[in-house]
Amino acid sequence: MARHISADRRFVVVLICVVAWGLAVGGKLVKLQVREHDKLLERAEHQQQFNIDLSPMRGVIYDRSGHELARSALVKSLYAQPSKIVDPAAAADKLATVLDDIDRDALLKRLKSSAVMVVVKRKLTREETAAIEKTDIPGLRLINEMKRFYVNGAAASHAIGFVDIDERGMGGVELVYDKVVRGQGGKILLDVDAFKNPYDHSVEDAVPGAGLTLTLDTMLQQDAEKALAEAIRTTGAKGGAIVILRPATGEILAIANSPTFDANKLADSSDEQRSNRAIETAFEPGSIFKAITYAAALDEGLIKPSSLIDCGRGEIKIGDHIIHDGHAGVMTARDALAKSSNVAAIKMGEKLGKARLAKYIEKFGFGRRTGIELPGESRGLLRDYKEWEATSLGAIPMGHEIGVTAVQAVAAFAAIANGGEWVQPHLVSQIGSSSDEPPTEHKAERRRVISESTANSLKEMLEAVVIHGTGKLAGISGYRAAGKTGTAQKVDPATGRYSKTRYVSSFAGFAPVENPQIACIVSIDEPRGVHLAAAVAAPVFAKVVADALRTLGVQPAVAASNEIASNGGHIFDISNTAGYPYLNSTSPAAAFDSAPAAPYQVSETRATELSAVPNLIGRGIREAADMCAARGIRLNVTGEGLVCLQSPDAGALIREGTVCYVTLSKRLLTGYRSMQAALESGGAQARGR
């Protein structure tokens, strides 16, 4: 009986152990097969696969006319399978001689690794790809990838930006809109065996990024960059910036910086070259800031353009300092601004007081970011008026003790041009979509900063600056221009005092005065020798704005030209070709650049009625195109620059739909600008600020 009980107990114990073991095994199986199934499957696939990430196809960036500025193109990247490399040292030696910028020792280390695949070099040039295809090194594999190309090289590089090796935006709108433009990269999935040899592969498709349309005009951008480069060269300046925008919309048409860089050759550029001076660098504006002081005084009813201001002996004492400007006696507010009287500006600042002056400075957008779609924008330098010193009302009204950016300044002048309404400057007009959704249109912030009547009075006063004041060399033939010169001393970092040799020379303004289409600022940093803005920045403004108005097809106002001429303003006119004897040359090769361009067809109107051919000589391509389109004439263009030859001749009667052939010449453009420069240098003796 006792033995029977003992056997039963042993059986129960064994049964319990078996059941417990079964439950443990079952639980483990449930855990592995159910709870950790996905995780283990992923691990197994990882062990059996090798992934190669492919860079995405970024969206195209266009200018305002639909011309490509940046696009992604297919290139080859070189990978190697170390297990197939028989002689790693020899392979490393050969590859280092074929490929640029390859570290031979680092490559050898990768070729000796146990990895399934290693990178040799990504995004090869065409020459490198051709050289690799001729090699007999086993284990190499060329894989398709996307690479960003900037169609116009260095043009607008600060605005467009650049990307890194993985196509991630690193500057400009490429960075700000990276999530929109970049899209999603694809993958190559290699199936490998236990010996890490690939035996099959699959591809995960990339998702293309959305496109962007910028407000930039490529022709205006290139003209601005050329004008800035020439100004830097002739003045020996350290750098500079030019910004052009439409006052009514806030659209940036051009934003040029010097020094600059080519995003296609990013490795050759420095931090200084990649710095966007137009938005990142704050400078003391000098006398261009007087426009803000006058705007405040006019809007507060303290002065009128005809108000008399007693400037005494042309000096004023502020605290322990005496400020001189050489303009003595009683003059109207209009003349005081035209002559850039420091005494008058300071007296207006004192009438306004700190609080009211600060209010207008802030309303015009100084001391805060404009919100332009570019990284690194500076707020500028503006202290709270409660922290101003006793001498601040002697400095700030004439543009010292304050730092502004070029974009802030041109937006402020655009507000004056726009009847007193400030419009946020912006660079992106439309954001595309990678789906079927419609693109997003930009909506600019708007706010009134001064009354329309104040703006009209100030426009008249700023025009007087150009007609008979310090801005005479900013005059433009056929157009009424307005603006203000500004020459500001820079602070010497070594002494902490204002330097007597370092200046920033600026001119900010707009045209035509009666219907402003262009607002522009030219800022030249540390010109050598002659440094007055009247001689340094004003002529550049004239060149850039004249080119812009003609490119945009803005018709000249003859009356305005006569008015400026009668007041002694500097005038030039390219429509008269008598000064260019080479236009009558019998040799086409001597007369113009003969490289053909694609036909520029404006109209497909059928031949019905006779129309007179307009005089296109001396016109820019856009102005010529608009003039022909208005008459139903088709245009065929050869060359680059300004129109130097046309057939049929001006005044000839032709039927609508007839082709007018024109030849453009850079020599005409160069000759015109050389004549302008010569005329301007003749008037540069007029002293101004």
Image (cartoon, rainbow, N blue to C red):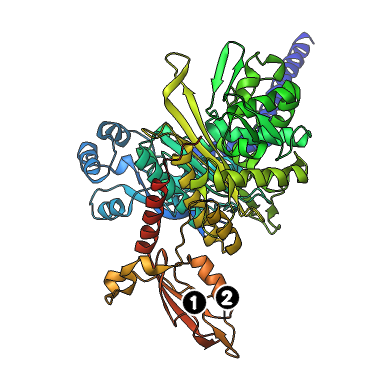
**Amino acid type indicated by mark 1:** Leu
Instruction: Tell me which residue sits at (36%, 59%) in the image.
Output: 671
From the viewer's perspective, is residue 637 above or below residue 241? below
Q: Is residue 370 above or below residue 517?
A: above
Going from N to C along the chain, the mark reached first, 2 or 1, is: 2
What residue is pinned by disc 2? 629
Relative side of 81 to 168, left or right: left
Residue 466: x %, y % from top left: 56, 46
Q: Residue furthest top?
A: 2
Residue occupying the point 44% across, 81% down: 649
Quadrant of the drawing holding the N terminus: top right
Look at label 2 and name its amino acid.
Answer: Ala
In the foreground, 221 or 77: 221
The reply to whether dot 2 and dot 1 touch (C-beta < 8 Å) is yes
Q: Residues within 10 Å of mark 2 (few under 14, many from 20)?
A: some
Identify which residue is drawn at 43% across, 72% down.
598
Q: Position of residue 615 (x, y in %)?
A: 49, 75
Could you tell me if residue 344 is visible in this image? yes
The reply, left or right, for residue 321 in relation to residue 122 is right
- What distance separates the C-alpha of mark 2 from that of mark 1? 8 Å
Residue 55: in sight, yes or no? no
- What residue is pinned by disc 1? 635
Residue 40 position (above or below residue 418): above
